[in-house]
């Protein structure tokens, strides 16, 4: 009997032309509007898989990181942006697919694992993938406990883990960029985490240690107080 042919793996999402066009337009626009100060951009390796692990303060974060990094960056994006109906729904699906977005469902189990697998496939392809280990944005300004998914991807793919600290994105107000004396945003890329000592450590213990090192590095970069608990103040 002939063995069944295994199903072909889903193609790895890739940023399309709209992503690179958007960066060309948004970089100078963001500089004019928000005057972002970018620190440590050279800490992101020029080649190979890189996992950016950042704090999350506002929706703006998913745009300010790709426009600040030297390499193209892909993200997990809420699944609702891929499932809408009508013209607007189709436009969102096209746009977020074009920028290489990976849909993530607010659920555990199969859907959550599928999102992690998609992120890992991007890293295995040698690209840059960004995550918010807190899971959702912080409304109280504190840095909340990290979930284990980012550590799982780092452990599974061997990607370099670069912590990112965002400062000021949570205080941006509509039209606030037009006011005099507006604060500057900061994007701080830290040095890749040294995880060499975790070789041979059991997976569960290694993932917990990677998560702790990740969140500690983010806290140093962002200056945030750590809450010590899972973020339950936001759903987006």
Image (cartoon, rainbow, N blue to C red):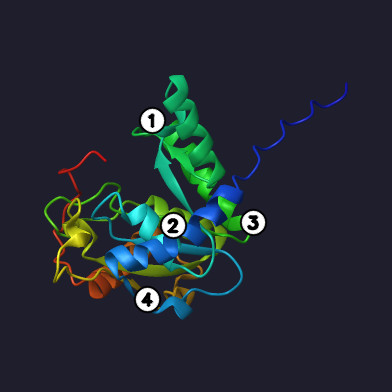
Q: Name which of mark 1 and mark 3 comes first in the sequence.
A: 1
Under circle 1, the secondary element is helix
Q: Name which of mark 3 and mark 4 comes first in the sequence.
A: 3
Mark 3 residue crowding within 10 angstroms, few (<14) / some (14–19) / many (20+) = few
Report x, y in % for residue 125. Answer: 64, 56
Under circle 2, the secondary element is strand
Q: Name which of mark 2 and mark 4 comes first in the sequence.
A: 2
Quadrant that contains the C terminus: top left
Quote the CA–CA distance across marks 1 and 3: 26 Å
Report x, y in % for residue 235. Answer: 23, 38
For label 2, the residue is: 130
For label 4, the residue is: 190
Under circle 4, the secondary element is loop
For label 1, the residue is: 80
User: Residue 125 shows which numbered tag?
Assistant: 3
**In front: mark 1 or mark 3?**
1
- Residue at the spot 26% in from the left edge and 70% down from the top edge: 216
Q: Name which of mark 2 and mark 3 comes first in the sequence.
A: 3
């Amino acid at each position: 009997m002939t063995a069944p042919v295994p199903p072909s793996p889903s193609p790895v999402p890739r940023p399309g032309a709209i992503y690179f066009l958007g960066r060309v337009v948004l970089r100078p626009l963001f500089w004019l509007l928000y005057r972002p100060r970018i620190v440590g951009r050279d800490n992101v390796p020029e080649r190979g898989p890189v996992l950016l692990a950042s704090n999350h303060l506002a929706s703006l974060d998913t745009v300010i990181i790709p426009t600040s990094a030297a390499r193209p960056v892909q993200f997990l994006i809420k699944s609702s942006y891929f499932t809408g109906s009508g013209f607007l729904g189709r436009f969102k699906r096209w746009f977020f697919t074009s920028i290489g977005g990976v849909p993530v469902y607010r659920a555990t189990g199969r859907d959550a694992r599928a999102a992690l697998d998609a992120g890992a496939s991007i890293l295995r392809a040698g690209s840059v993938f960004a995550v918010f280990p807190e899971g959702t944005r912080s409304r109280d300004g504190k840095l909340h406990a990290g979930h284990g998914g980012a550590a799982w991807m780092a452990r599974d793919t061997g990607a370099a883990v670069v912590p990112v600290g965002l400062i000021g994105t949570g205080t941006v107000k509509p039209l606030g960029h037009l006011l005099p004396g507006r604060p500057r945003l900061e994007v701080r890329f830290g040095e890749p985490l040294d995880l060499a000592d975790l070789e041979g450590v059991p997976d569960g213990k290694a993932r917990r240690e990677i998560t702790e090192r990740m969140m500690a590095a983010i806290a140093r970069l962002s200056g945030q107080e750590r809450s010590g608990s899972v973020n339950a103040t936001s759903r987006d």
